[in-house]
Amino acid sequence: MRCIEFGQAKTKVSEVMVGLMRIDQMSVAKVTELVETALDEGINALDIADVYGHGACESLLGEVFAANPGLRDRVFLQSKVGIRKEDDGFTWYDFSKEHIIEAVDASLSRLGVDHVDSMLLQTCHIDGEMPPVERAIVCVRSHGMKRAKAMAMRSGSNAPSVAHVSAAPDVPYQWKVATS
């Protein structure tokens, strides 16, 4: 499996990620098998989000990490925040500073970890002012994301703002702009 170098530490990350969106109905043993099989094939990157299974997927992965000491250290863990989904199905994006901090804290708790390797803003289409997001990133960094390497913006129109944020001396994150 080919790998890329990620972040300033140049962490080796497989080019292929295992998406864990639909694991909430699986057992701890089956998810462990899935992750171990991926690792055996050279895939060390896992992708999850707080909205997957209303948090149940993160909780299950946290159980897998708890049941398998050392497994967390063998994977590159990427998560995402920014989507709110009510039990009645109503869904909206919330990229407010308060929600980002709350969502990251909740994700870390459900996963049972002190950090993830990459935290993304889920399907983020923010046009205009960036300071609230920038302030949230600084706060997230002080709330348990000290080792995080990235947050992503997913809109080509954000490129000038993203470049400004990535150059800010107090925000040591790499920003990835993916247009679609």
Image: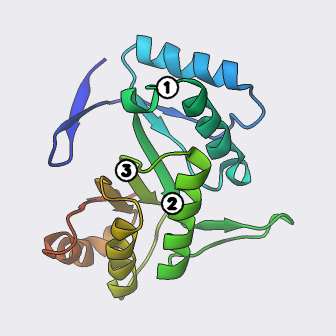
Q: Is residue 90 above or below residue 61?
A: below
Q: Which residue lies at the image location 58% right of the left edge and 54% below the top edge?
A: 109
**Circle nearer the viewer, 1 or 2:** 1
Taking the spot 32% from the left edge, 54% from the top edge, the residue there is 148
Residue 126 as seen in the image, left or right of residue 175:
right
The percent position of residue 129, horizontal first and vertical second, equals 35, 88
Residue wearing tag 1: 69
Quadrant of residue 112 within the rendered picture: top right
Q: What residue sits right under mark 3 in the picture? A: 118
Q: CA distance from mark 3 to mark 1?
A: 21 Å
Q: Seen in the image, is 62 located left or right of residue 18? A: right
Q: CA distance from mark 1 to mark 2?
A: 29 Å
Q: Which mark is residue 122?
A: 2
* 72 relative to 59 in the view: left or right: left
Q: Which mark is residue 154?
A: none
Q: Looking at the image, is mark 2 or mark 3 nearer the viewer?
A: 3
Q: Quadrant of the N terminus?
A: top left
Mark in front: 3 vs 1: 1
